[in-house]
Amino acid sequence: MCALSPPPRLLCVPLPALDPQCRPRSEGASSGRRAAENPNPMSAGDQKSGGDKPEDALPVATVWPEVARAECLARGAALKWASGVFCRPEHLERLSQYRKRESQRTSSIHTRLKVTSQTHTNTYASRHNVTSGYEMIWEVWQLCTLEDLAVVTAAAVLPMLLSFQSMIQSYLEGVGWGLEQLREARLELREVSHAVKKAGLESSRNAEGVKSLERLREVSVSHRQLLAAVSNLPRLYSVRSMVLETERLVESRRLLEAHARLMDLECWQDDILWQLHGAAGTAGSALSAEDQELVAKYFSGVGQLVDALGKELWAVVSSALALAQQNPTPFVSAVRIVEREEALDRALLEERGRTRGTSRPLPPGRPRCWRACFFQVLDEAVSARFRSVSYLHTRGPGLAGHLSALQHGIMADLATVRHLLEHCVPPHYRLTGAYLRAGHRCLHAHLAQVSSWDLESGEIFAVLNWVLHIYNSPDMMGHPELVAEMEKVELGPLISTEGLEQLQNKYVQSVRKSVSEWMHKALQVELQDWQRDQEPDTDHEGFYQTSLPTIITQMLEENARVARMIGESLRDQTIQMGLYEMENLLNRFREALVEFGKEHRRNPSNIKNKFYLHYLLASISNCIILKKSTESLQKQQSSRSAGQFSRTPPDPLAALDRAVRRACRLVMDQLLQDLQPFLSGLLTRAWLVQGDPTPKLCHVLERHLELHGRVRPPCRQRLQEEAQWLTVVEYVRALMQKRLVCRNAEERRQLAQQMVQDDQRFREILHGLEGEGSVPEVNPLSLLSVLADFLRLKDPGMLTLEVSGLAAKYPDIGEEHVSVLLDIRGDVSRDIRGAVLDLLEQSAPPLPAGYRPIFTDILVPPSTMAFCLPTAKCA
């Protein structure tokens, strides 16, 4: 007997005694490895002498010397680990967790050993055809890796090897039992095959006998058909009379009795067809075409009766709304017949479905589906009710009346259906919901047709208001008694979202056309008013105005109010359109102002232009009113919809500003034209002595300022400021003409004193402007006193300082302006002039923000003589 010794430094694995024949088939290369693995092999004689005795086997408890050492090391490692983990009493609470984890780890090692050993066993057995259990164990031992042997404990290997032996033995027993079952199955299949062959031979011999019975079967079928015909002769003879009687009942509208007769006739027809069909005795036979034509001929009146009865039924259903208030009995009879037909259809379909193997056909004309026809006829009746509403006056103002008539007709029909017809039908009919759906579909189609017409704005408003507000209001579908039914029925919108958008766009375009026409007419009336021989009208505050802003404002506000009745979206579109038209109107208005000014300049003495200035001022007041109206409309727009209807939003305020600027410019041009005759007399010798032109000039200025007071603020202040600016600029321009050159200090004093007096007069006239607090940061009137001080200065050496202050206060003053002022003084030497001009050139400050130039608009005339001739005296 051979004993296996484990390799050194591994756990000892006790093995049972092995058979002396359990050696591998190859003794070559593996013998050295076995000798190395088995340092104490038994001799061959020992194997021969007692290898087959069980008492000669190695004792199971044989161990290696290294086992004790390994066990001590393992116990020491475990104690060290436990002392580190359970160093505190509270750590003992986790003892169960560590115990569970170590148990799971041990089970995993056992499972791994079993799987590895079974895999090696199966692999070796399949490759080497091992039949001996001990030989397989030996080979598994050789195939196990050092890692597998290292993780196996001594107590786990022996049960595993024993389980391998029992498993292989059970496999062999199962294979033997399976082979026995296969032998028995083969014998049984052989017996069945013999029986099938025998039955096939018997069937072939009986086939000729069956063919001889075909003729007998045909005679039997013919006999049964004749028997059915004879037995149904009384019915066949009475068919004609029953058809006539049923026709009479239908004509007299005794519908229930007529339907009972009709059902009897159909039952006869169905029974006769089935008997002739041959299904009573032989399944699968078909009725010939001749027999079908014969039965159809006998019962030809039945189909006509069905059509006549259906026609009467649908006539009653279509007039149900009228019959309900007079005599609902025919309608109730019609509903009962419809339900009978529906039940009969359902019963026949169920019966034919259960007897599908007999292939019994449905009676002719079945199923009739009269309940579906009932609701279809109801839809047609509702459509007819809609068509009965007069279409003669649906266009123009009559469209609103037509929609009102539709409203009253629908609500009256709904009241009839809810209070009368609903009680005449089964509850599952839900007649009110059916009428609502039918009416909604008819309304949808009708309104789609109306929307396709070329409607005016008023007609479109009537349609939109009816669809969006009246239809869903408590007066119609929002009625308290209809709310519950409306929740069950999903009707959808009367007009789709796209249709509503198209209608709204058509409405806006129609209103735009009307607004454009009205604005054009209002502008023409305004132009005609400008030619009147009287002042413009004034409002309760005394401001000039005409009818133009009133017409435009009322029209736009009214359109926005009407559109708001439909919805915010339409209101925003209408306001947007109005702002576009306002901008176009203001552009045309500005062009008209320009043409009005040109015509006045061509013929200022024309009597039609007598109140030219007055109407210019009225135009400015009109623009102020239109500006307020525009701002009000813009505030009414919702912030989310502003600018979403077009890529370039309208800007009427900019157009208003341009028109106001143009009108103010024309007013200033007229002021300049009225001042022009007096400006030529300013700053001359005569003016210095008498001061004559200034009072007249002040009178003209005062008259203009008085007219400017008829303009609404803030343009009134703007006009007064422009008038002040114009007066000062023209006064300084007259000074720059060098009409007066002082010859001595007395003349310079007189010149400065007269300029101060003129400044005081201008201030007295313009005191109203200063009182209103709208004087600019640089008051142009203060320029006259500054220039007077410059001319009155006695010491020419101080001119440099004076010019420095002048340039600091009026940075737009140029060298040519200072040079003219020095010339007017008449006492400035060439050196002082050069020093002053050099200082001005070096200290020219930039224009501050918000500064309005004065000297920039004043051009100095060129000198008429570059130098003095020696033969003539200088003036």
Image (spheres, rainbow, N blue to C red):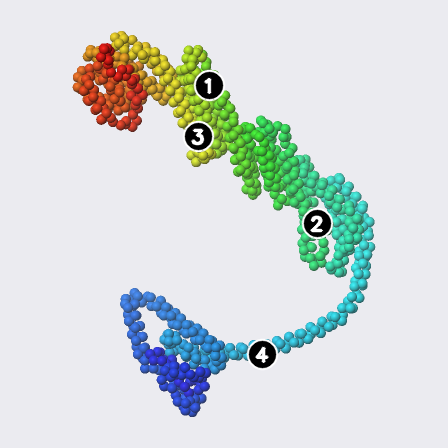
Report which residue position mark 2 lands on. Answer: 366
401 versus 859 height, above or below: below
Mark found first going from the N terminus, 2 or 4: 4
- Which circle, 1 or 4, is nearer the viewer? 1
State whether residue 413 appears in this view: yes
What amino acid type should be assigned to the residue bearing mark 1? Glu
| Mark 1 vs 3, N-terminal side | 1
Q: Which residue is mark 1?
A: 526
> Which of 190 and 343 lies nearest the eye of the viewer?
190
In this rendering, position of residue 640 left or right of residue 342: left
In three-dimensional space, the C-alpha distance between marks 1 and 3, rounded to whole angstroms, equals 24 Å
Q: Is residue 713 visible?
A: no
Q: Position of residue 501 (x, y in %)?
A: 52, 35
Which tag, 2 or 3, sits closer to the chain's start? Answer: 2
Please name the amino acid that badge 3 sits on. Answer: Pro
User: Residue 808, image x and y in percent?
Assistant: 23, 24
Query: Where, by quadrant of the figure, is residue 384 drawn?
Result: top right
Quarter of the image containing the N terminus?
Answer: bottom left
495, above or below 682, in the image: below
Q: Earlier in the sequence, mark 2 or mark 1?
A: 2
